[in-house]
Amino acid sequence: MMDDFSSIIDKHFYMSDGGRIYSDIINSIEKSVIIKALEQTDGNQLRTSRLLGVNRNTLHKKILRYSIDVRRFKR
């Protein structure tokens, strides 16, 4: 798991022109965490929000921000 994060961090350091490295890394990791949680909950957003410990509305906004298609996780 740490190797996954290291590769995300390395990618942003090598591809960035500076000034946004921190926010780019945080956004990338946050998106990955949300996707993993949606996989675990079969796309159920209420269960995902509880699993992550975030408000359901906050989760929904992040799903929209990252253009995550929740339907692909439903079984």
Image (spheres, rainbow, N blue to C red):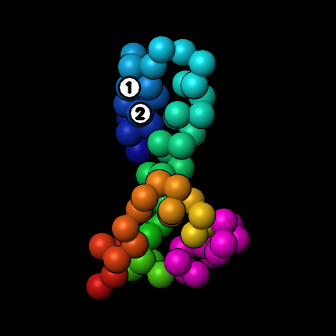
For the point 52% across and 55% down, the residue is 65
- Magenta part of the chain: 45-58
Would you name the residue on which mark 2 appears?
A: 8
33 or 22, which is in the foreground? 22
For the point 54% across and 43% down, the residue is 27
- Amino acid type at image mark 1: Lys
1 is within the stretch colored magenta? no
Rendering quarter of residue 35: bottom left
Query: In what element is the residue under mark 1?
Result: helix
- CA gap between label 2 and label 1 equals 5 Å
- Amino acid type at image mark 2: Ile
* Left-right relation of 49 to 9: right
7 or 14, which is in the foreground? 14
* Left-right relation of 32 to 73: right
Residue 12 can be seen, yes or no: yes
| Residue 37 against residue 45 in the figure, above or below | above
The residue furthest bottom is 75
Give coordinates of residue 28: x percent, y percent. 47, 42
Q: Are marks 2 and 1 in contact (CB under 8 Å)?
A: yes
Quarter of the image with the N terminus in it: top left
| Residue 38 against residue 8 in the figure, above or below | below
